[in-house]
Image: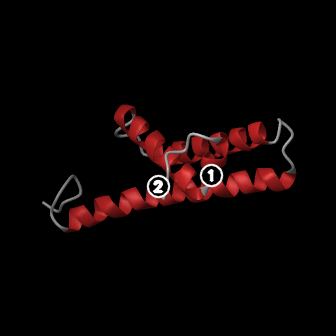
Amino acid sequence: MIDFPLTLNAVLTVAGMAIISCLLAQWLKQYLADWRFTNLLVLGLNLVVALLAQAIRSGWRPSSEECFLAVLLGLFGASLATFGYETILNLLGKAGIGSRAAS
């Protein structure tokens, strides 16, 4: 079962980073609806959150391996959230529903 990431250990999982990415993306899409680079900003913010969580977990002295793990978790979590969102919108568009529906 996937729980909402409320602890550092839960945040530093692919599922935790994907949930954080989804939340970041939804907030940013409210304020930057027509901006093309929203997903890149989500990726960058997700990497910052992952590195910050890893730094806090390691007592502000993360090793290079821990930093690399945080970057991978941030990348995979943001990719899962972003590509999943885009896939759903594209499938809805193919079905004739939503903003990507062919007119």
Q: Secondary structure at mark 1?
A: helix
Residue 22 is left or right of residue 87, and the answer is: right
Q: Position of residue 48 (x, y in %)?
A: 66, 40
Q: Position of residue 15 (x, y in %)?
A: 54, 56
Q: Residues within 10 Å of mark 2 (few under 14, many from 20)?
A: many
Task: Report the residue at 51% width, 52% height from top.
Answer: 18
Q: Nearest the camera: 74 or 54?
A: 54
**Which quadrant is home to the C terminus?**
bottom left
Q: Quadrant of residue 57?
A: top right
Residue 19 is left or right of residue 73, and the answer is: left
Residue 50 vs 83, above or below: the answer is above
Q: Position of residue 102 (x, y in %)?
A: 17, 62
Q: Nearest the camera: 4 or 31?
A: 4
Residue 31 is left or right of residue 24, and the answer is: left
Residue 56 is left or right of residue 23, and the answer is: right
Amino acid identity at mark 1: Gly
Task: Please indicate, yes or no, whether residue 66 appears anywhere in the rendered image.
Answer: yes
Q: Position of residue 28 (x, y in %)?
A: 43, 36
Q: Secondary structure at mark 2?
A: helix
Residue 30 vs 74, above or below: the answer is above
Q: Nearest the camera: 10 or 38?
A: 10
Which residue is label 1 attached to? 74
Residue at far top of view: 31
Q: CA distance from mark 1 to mark 2?
A: 11 Å
Tell me which label, 1 or 2, sits earlier in the chain: 1
Amino acid identity at mark 2: Ala
Task: Please indicate, yes or no, whether residue 37 appears anywhere in the rendered image.
Answer: no
Task: Report the residue at 87% width, 39% height from top.
Answer: 61
Task: Report the residue at 56% width, 48% height from top.
Answer: 43
Residue 71 vs 35, above or below: the answer is below
